[in-house]
Image (cartoon, rainbow, N blue to C red):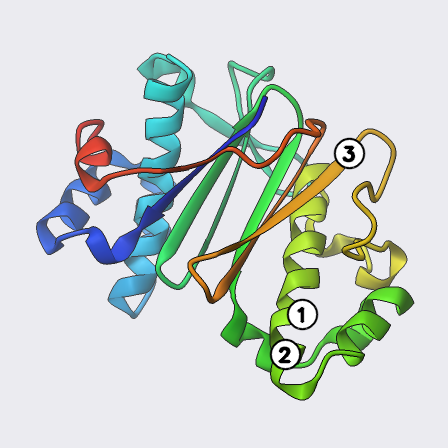
Amino acid sequence: MSTVLVFDIDRLPDDGTARFRRAVPDDRRGRADNFHFPDDRKRCLAAGVLLRYALLVGHGLREHELHLSRNKFGKPCLTHRPDLHFNLSHAGRWVVCATSGTRIGVDIEHVAAGTRDIAHRFAPDEHAYVAAAPPAERARRLIQVWTRKESYLKCVGRGLTTPLNSFSTHPSNPSPSPGLFLKQIPHDDDYWLAECSEDDSPIDLRHTTTEALLAVC
């Protein structure tokens, strides 16, 4: 069973950002500090705290079990709990954390990001799907496909080392490879959210409050 937690950074007060910063590991704190814009820092820090909340509260882990390592492709994993998988994503107002007992990938993107037309890099049926949309809907359809592809790549743990045209996640195809299932929902009007996992049940989306996250800081 997989769970997807979402958090709206617009609900985070300025003093909350400082508390988030103190709660995350040194490497995430350093990445956040390197961002120029405050919202980029908020997203980075909130992702770390959302993961912390998911592991401590949602899965009952203890502090010493939160240590992370990375595979050869850079995908983070829990050093002491290889049975528990997670993935993070953020865009615009939203930060997302997915957890599961099996491989999982999640992606969220704002439709506005689809104004950069990269559909020619997709598989032929995906490219045709985007190209067939009316001009006003093309960005939405492109991001629909992009989030599906990104969630799949994050699930298998290879990231963008895999050519985008070497596999298809066309919306008519719920399983891009044996044993994996793609699910997708529109979120907050202008976003697409996609999950790829070994669980074929619908996306279990749960909103998380500022108060809940601050409680684990």
Horizontal and vertical percent for residue 57? 33, 19
Q: Nearer the viewer, residue 103 or 112?
A: 112
Which quarter of the picture shows residue 115? bottom right
The residue at which mark 2 appears reads as: 137
The answer to which quarter of the image holds residue 149 is bottom right
Kindly report which numbered mark, 3 or 2, lies closer to the viewer in this rendering: 2
Question: Vertical placement of 120 versus 96: above or below?
Answer: below
The N terminus - image quarter:
top right
Is 118 on the left or on the right of 69, as rendered?
right
Residue 117 in sight in this render: yes
Task: Residue type at mark 3: give it.
Answer: Leu
Which dot marks residue 151? none
- The answer to whether 209 is drawn above or below residue 40 in the figure is above
Question: Disc 3, disc 2: CB below 8 Å?
Answer: no
Q: Is residue 33 left or right of residue 101?
A: left
For badge 2, the amino acid type reads Glu
Please name the residue shown 18% across and 50% down the image: 17
Q: Which residue is mark 1?
A: 141
The amino acid type of the residue labelled 1 equals Arg
Return the disc, 3 or 1, that comes first in the chain's sequence. Answer: 1
Number of the label disc, if any, that sits on residue 180: 3
